Image: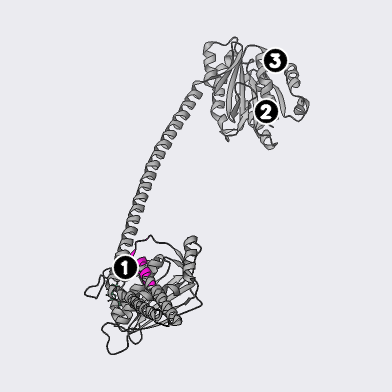
Amino acid sequence: MSGTELRKTGIGVVGDVPWGTHFFLFHETKDDLLDTLVPYFKAGLEAKELCIWVISGPLTENEVRYALGKDIPDLDAYLEDQSMQILQGREWYMSGEDLDLEKVTREWNQKLEFALTRGYAGLRLSAGTAWLEKRHWKEFLDYEGEVNRSIGEQPMLALCTYPLIGSAAAEILDVTRTHQFAVVRRNGRWEVVETSELKQAKREIQKLNDELEQRVIERTRQLTVANQELKQQSAERQHAEDALGAARAELAHATRVTVMGEMVASIAHEVTQPLTGIVTNGNACLNWLRSTTPNMDRAQGAVERIIRDGERASEVIHEIRSLVKKTPPQKILLDINDLIRKTITLAAGEIARSQVQLETDLASDISEITGDRVQLQQALLNLIVNAIEAMGAVKERPRRLLIRSARHEEPFGVVVTVSDSGVGLDPDKRNRVFDAFFTTKPQGLGMGLSICRTIISTHGGRLSARSNANHGATFEFTLPARTGEIESSEANANRVAATA
Ligand code: ADP
């Protein structure tokens, strides 16, 4: 069939059909023919098709022109430019006394060519067969069969009309067989009667559709199952990731508590020292007040020192609590120098006890970062404690701990270095210190640096280690400058705390 474009037949019961449709009409009266063929050609002319009506009895050419003219106002123009052609059946099909179907086939082809070269959409024809004699019946039916087989390839519609009166049952069956469907008047109403060929074709199309639908249903089912499996896998994976995250957090907490435990003596000292100061200054204050001439100025000085020591002790306790308490991670705005100073407060006792000289070199032009305060403090504290431990055995040179902060240009952010003058890292160790459970210490767990690296990388930074030129090692981490995603109330609270 040429294309899937539908053509209006103009015949109500038939509706639209594709090009290549070959159907027929059994007629009894002239009105049967005019009722159907006038709207059929009117629709064709309106759709810019070349229209050819091969007439035969009982209609005459004048009757046809009159009937067409009533419904088609521009009929004369159509006849004039040959868009509508009215031909005589007998002359069209016969040469003398003989049926000349070769000539007919040739001429139909010429008409089609004419239609296409003149820019018509296609060829619409109707041919009456009332002139047909019994002796030509078989030959004509073979021709109709051939038309039926070949028309599907062409932009053509063909409606053949057969007189019902005088047709034998066998002839009716012959006509039915050689067309796609019939238009018949039954009980005064037009109906479409499908031939077995059309029924068969429709059944096959229906079957194909059913199969296709079945395949679509099956495929949809398979996809739904696959989708559910994927969803389940993804849920399981999420579950495993959550469990891993929770385990990591537990481990980080455990190591934090362990480090604090190891430092308990120094930390206790850090708290005891101001407490001793408080007691001493309290006693002094009492003495100044109990004196016969109370010295208010000195008493006030003692109280001020009490307050200062109290604040120092409470700051240490606050830091310890925040590191030991289990809290979910919170990303907030942080001043890295402030974080370094607070961590040093915690380690100060250990630094002093281990006779380590602490130097700090904190840059003032660095930007704020976003991160979890407890986690970053843990990472830094770990590096400091490791540095102190690496210098434990050093006797012949000063034990120096240098903590620096600086701008980091590429990628833009901050860089923090912790350098010591300890035993240093030999090349073999340097690659393994970040492995979980790698330790060279008798009581070591080997988790500290592995956790540090995880903490820094979840903050978008990098932690690395190198040996110093002279002695000792340097651990260095970078952190990106602040990003937009911060929990604002926390951030504000933190800013207030940092500036207070
Ligand atoms: P732990 O401290 O329990 O051993 P870490 O993961 O913190 O676990 O450290 C792993 C190992 O890395 C240490 O045992 C030590 O051998 C080495 N190391 C860490 N920091 C330093 C340092 N500053 N100097 C030399 N070696 C270090």
Q: Main secondary structure of the magenta part?
A: helix
Tell us which disc is closer to us: 2 or 1. 1
Separation of marks 2 and 1 at Cα, in angstroms: 91 Å
The answer to whether residue 197 is left or right of residue 246 is right
* Relative image position of residue 356 (x, y in whole percent): 33, 83
Disc 2, SS: helix
Residue linked to disc 2: 44
Locate residue 438: give its quadrant.
bottom left
Separation of marks 3 and 1 at Cα, in angstroms: 109 Å
Q: Nearer the viewer, residue 213 or 36?
A: 213
Please rate how many residues cluster around mark 2, counting C-alpha atoms within 10 Å: few if below 14, some from 14 to 19, many from 20. many
Q: Residue at x 40, y 65 (%)?
A: 458
Locate residue 126: give its quadrant.
top right
Residue linked to disc 1: 256
Mark 3 CB in 8 Å range of ligand 1?
Answer: no
Q: Nearer the viewer, residue 422 or 384?
A: 384
Q: Residue furthest bottom?
A: 396
Residue linked to disc 3: 59
Q: Which mark is residue 463?
A: none
Q: Amino acid at mark 2?
A: Gly
For residue 7, above or below residue 219: above
Residue 105 visible (yes or no): no
Earlier sequence position, callout 2 versus callout 3: 2
